[in-house]
Structure formats: C-alpha cells, structure tokens
C-alpha cells in the first residue's frame, strides 16, 4: 500500500496560478501585479490586540462558532454596514478565512451529485471545493461585453437553472466587477424561480468605488436561501490572520458548524482578538486604504487608456481585468514577466470566461505601479 | 467625484507627484490639477514643499541638533499670544512654533549646528524676551517618526509574488 491521492483530489486540475508563481519566483527584482492580497499591513491596533491577548495568556480554544464578543461585533457591523442583520448565537460562524466557510458550506449543504453553478472567472477555490464535496460543477462564464457582471442571460444559457446552488464573488476577484442592487435583483429572481440556494462570497464588500455594495441576502425572499461569506483579509488587510465568517439561516450554520467543530474546532484565537479590535477601532484605516486603492485604480485605468489597452471600469476589489493586447494572454504574461520583470496573471487561471484577459492587481504602492505601467508601455512598443 | 481636497491629500502623501500623477489618480484633468495647486499656493494653503529627512541616517560631520522648548509667557493688555509668537517665529533657528494647551504655552522647535549653539540661542535670544517667564529645553536624542513617516526599518513586502 502506498499513498496515492484519492480520486476526488486527483480530479482537481493543477492550479494555473501555481505555474505562474513558480516562473515569477525564479526571477529577481520583479514588480508583481499578480498578488491577491493587500500590500498594507494589518492595522496596528489589531496587531497590538493580538499581541496583548498573547501576553495575557489567551491561548486556548474558543467556542466552536467563535468568541461571542466577536460574533456580536460582526452582527453589529454587518447590520450597520451592509444591512445584514444576523443573530450572533445562531446565524454566524467564525471560520479560518472566508475560504474555510465556503468549503464547509459545500460539504455541509450539498449532497454528492448536487450541482453547483460556479460564476466565472472566479477565485480559484470554488471548483475544487465543489469537487471535494462530491458536487457537480456547472460553469457559468460571465462575458467581457457585460463587464463580467452576472446576468439572467448568462445564467440561462449556461444551464444554471438545473443546478441546486449558485456560488459567486462580487466585488469580483479577478475582474474587479461589481453588481448593483438592481442587477442582483435579476439574479435573485432567477434563483427563486429555479429554487437555487446562493453562496455569496462578499469578501471584497467594503472595497467598492463607484457604488455601495449590496448583498443579495438583503433582497426579498433571499435571506432564507443565501449564505454570505465575509472576513477580515481584504478590507482590514489581515490575510495572514486567517479569519472570516459565514452568515446564514440557523439550520445551515448549524450544519456547517458540525463539520467545523470536528475539523477546525475553532478559528485561531489570537486572530479573533485582533478581529474584535479591528471592528472596534480600525474602520478609519479601512477607509484610508480604500481611498488609496481607488486612486491606484484610477491611475491604472488611465494608463491603460493611454496605452490603448481595452479595460472596463472595474469598480471593486483591487483588480483591473483588461483585455490582453495579444491573442494568447498566457504567452503575453510570460513574455512580460521575462522581458520586463512585471508579473500579471493570465485570466485563464480563473476559469471559464477569463481567457484573453489579464488580472492586474493594484494592491501595490504607486511608485511600483507607475514603474510597472511604464514597463508595460515600453513592452507594447 | 474627486474634491480638491484630494489633491492636497496626494501632495501631503508625496509632494513630488507630478500634476499628471495626480490627475491620473483623481477625476481631475492635468490642467485642473495645475490650476488647483496654483490656487493653493496663492491662497497660502500650501506653504511649501520639503523633504522629510532622517538626519540620523545622514553621514555627515556637520551635526544637526534639534530641541523642543517649552515656553511659558505672561500676557498683558497690550500683548497677546500672536504678538509674542511673531517675535519668536522670526528667528531662523526656530523651525516650528505652536501654541498648546496644558502646563506651558508655546511648543517651540529649534535647530542648530551644536548643543552649544542651541543653548546660546535659547539663553540669548528667547529667554530674554520680556513676556517669557520660563523655558524648558529638551534635546532630541533620536527621531523615530516625522510628519507621519516612520524612520525604522521599512517593512519588507513578504507577500508571495503571485497569489490567487
């Protein structure tokens, strides 16, 4: 007997990001616009709260669902900021990153053979998570001409009506696309008509620049069929703390907690203390980071325009998703890396509908961003 | 829509941004940015542009000595804080001067080539001003942060070069 990956692991295709990461790692002094996390460090008050918790010896497990003080603050924050009132005792589960929450939801709520419609291009975990859960995947590729928004048309033509669940991320990684309340209303109506539950990854909810974020769970008839995922990684720049949360109806959260309590037990304790402080006192820093992202976004879009690179006005997260000037985006990204030392990620790494595009992250300080844009410009010439 | 305040914020962040850099980061055109900066300068809103220097990192034989000085003053009918401040601020050795609340009245920052020079300046030029009743001088031994900029080792970007 030797160790061989189980079939469901074998089924997961190799990560397109991984290959590119290895290429970039071989090179010195690159400017990377290929990073999917903030360049800011976590707010100092949150870091200090983590340190203080260690000094006071707060090193035990917490309640499976997360510290009650944290869940209370999450409830207040979500009700105030996103009009999402959830009960801290029964409807909120604190997880090790939003990613854990998505995995839990798929495994706890989907049966083998159930189908999950995965809106793409998307964050890279959804399809593997679905496979690990034994669920079938229905690809829902959004379109460049819709600026990568999810439309009824796309849902219908992809066969999502036959699926049991829909998973998406808006504001979107990798495209930076956002959905307004009106646009989401169409999606909500589709989900009600075809009886789909929704897994709404809203990790970038607070990073929007043109309009306020709307959660699909706020729309009529949607709260009972939606799990919302959020966390501290993006807006609070706390990726390494690994802290997120899921919000949904009590029975769903209960089922997810049943896996969570046996696999994770509880989310990292130190991170929970940091998160409490983040919610108590770090909102101003979030706003400052958001305005920095917005300026960089405008900067990048304006440089693209001058270079003649076709890019829609991405209004959220910290990504722009321009059309690649060459037909083959993988080849372009590789050449740009090797000749100019600038890393961007080809859109094909993010699933269906992403090919022919590039994900350009502006989670990088302006001096580097400026230099990277200039190198890209000379590369194109 | 951007407000002109954003242009100020950007100049505070980096006074060496070109008008083009600022225009690209806001909704203003290059011309609008240039006009706004000119207005700021004319109105005395933007008083100047200076580098934030960590003197501790400058390898030079010319020592720069800085001190903060707490000043107490006595007012009378003819003399207000502004009058006293005017007299003090005119000395080139004085790099900043603020009226503050609390145990003393003015918070003064002085710069010189040596401790001796700074001491003489305080005793010869500041202390004798009739309204000044007390001075307490603190020499700055080390500077860790100036104008919002930390002087410690900069955080390395330790993020993975490419991540999802």
Image (cartoon, coloured by chain):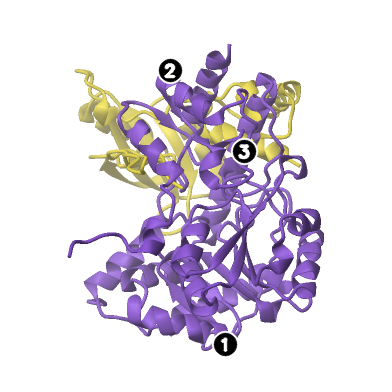
Chain colours: A purple, B yellow
Residue matched to label 2: A339
Residue under the image location 40 percent in, 50 percent down: A41
Q: Nearer the viewer, residue A283 or A362?
A: A362
Residue A62, visible in the rendered structure? yes
Chain of the residue under the numbered disc 2 shown in the image: A
Residue matched to label 3: A321
* First of labels 2, 1 by sequence position: 1
Q: Residues within 10 Å of mark 3 (few under 14, many from 20)?
A: many
Q: Is residue B28 left or right of residue A103?
A: right
Spot occupied by residue B97 in the image (x, y as percentages of width and height): 46, 39
Measure the alpha-carbon separation of dots 2 and 1: 54 Å
Q: Is residue A112 positioned above or below A205 on the image?
A: below
Residue matched to label 1: A250
Q: Is residue B137 left or right of residue A309?
A: left
Q: Please, which residue is most extreme toward the top here?
A: A381
Residue under the image location 49 percent in, 84 percent down: A255
Disc 2 secondary structure class: helix
* First of labels 3, 2 by sequence position: 3
């Amino acid at each position: 007997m030797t160790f061989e990956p189980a079939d469901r692991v074998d089924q997961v295709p190799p990560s397109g990001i991984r290959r590119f990461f290895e290429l970039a790692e071989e090179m010195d002094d690159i400017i990377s616009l290929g990073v999917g996390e903030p360049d800011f460090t976590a707010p100092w008050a949150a870091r200090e709260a983590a340190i203080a918790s260690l000094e006071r010896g707060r090193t035990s497990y917490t309640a499976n669902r997360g510290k009650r003080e944290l869940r209370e603050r999450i409830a207040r924050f979500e009700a105030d900021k996103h009009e999402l009132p959830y009960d801290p005792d029964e409807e909120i589960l604190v997880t090790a990153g939003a990613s854990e929450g998505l995995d839990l939801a798929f495994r706890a709520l989907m049966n083998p053979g159930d189908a999950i419609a995965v809106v793409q291009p998307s964050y890279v975990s959804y399809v593997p998570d679905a496979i690990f859960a034994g669920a079938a995947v229905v690809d829902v590729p959004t379109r460049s001409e819709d600026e990568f928004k999810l439309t009824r048309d796309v849902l219908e033509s992809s066969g999502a009506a036959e699926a049991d669940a829909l998973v998406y991320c808006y504001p979107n990684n990798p495209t930076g696309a956002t959905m307004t309340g009106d646009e989401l209303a169409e999606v909500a109506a589709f989900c009600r008509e075809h009886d789909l539950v929704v897994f709404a990854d809203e990790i970038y909810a607070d990073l929007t620049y043109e309009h306020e974020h709307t959660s699909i769970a706020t729309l009529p008839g949607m709260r009972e069929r939606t799990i919302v995922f959020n966390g501290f990684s993006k807006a609070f720049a706390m990726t390494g703390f690994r802290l997120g949360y899921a919000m949904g109806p009590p029975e769903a959260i209960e089922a997810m907690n049943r896996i969570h309590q046996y696999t994770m037990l509880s989310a990292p304790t130190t991170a929970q203390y940091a998160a409490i402080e983040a919610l108590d006192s770090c909102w101003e820093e979030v706003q400052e980071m958001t305005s920095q992202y917005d300026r960089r976004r405008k900067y990048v879009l304006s440089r693209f325009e001058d270079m003649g690179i076709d890019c829609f006005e991405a209004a959220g997260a910290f990504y722009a998703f321009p059309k690649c000037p060459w037909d083959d985006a993988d080849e372009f990204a590789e050449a740009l890396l090797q000749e100019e030392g600038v890393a961007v990620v080809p859109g094909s790494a993010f699933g269906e509908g992403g090919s022919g595009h590039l994900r350009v992250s502006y989670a990088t300080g302006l001096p580097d961003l400026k230099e990277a844009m200039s190198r890209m410009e000379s590369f194109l010439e | 829509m951007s407000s002109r305040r954003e242009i100020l914020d950007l100049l505070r962040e980096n006074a060496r941004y070109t008008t083009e850099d600022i225009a690209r980061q806001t909704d203003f055109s290059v011309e609008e940015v240039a006009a706004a900066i000119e207005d700021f300068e004319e109105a005395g809103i933007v008083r100047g542009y200076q580098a934030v220097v960590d003197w501790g990192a400058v390898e030079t034989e010319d020592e720069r000595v800085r001190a903060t000085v707490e000043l107490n003053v006595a007012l009378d009918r003819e003399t207000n804080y502004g009058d006293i401040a005017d007299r003090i601020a005119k000395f080139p050795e004085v790099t900043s001067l603020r009226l503050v609340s609390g145990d003393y009245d003015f918070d003064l920052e002085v710069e010189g080539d040596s401790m001796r020079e700074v001491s003489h300046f305080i005793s010869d030029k500041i202390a004798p001003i009739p309204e000044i009743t007390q001075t307490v001088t603190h020499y700055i031994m080390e500077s860790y942060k100036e104008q919002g900029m930390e002087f410690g080792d900069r955080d390395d970007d330790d993020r993975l070069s490419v991540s999802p």
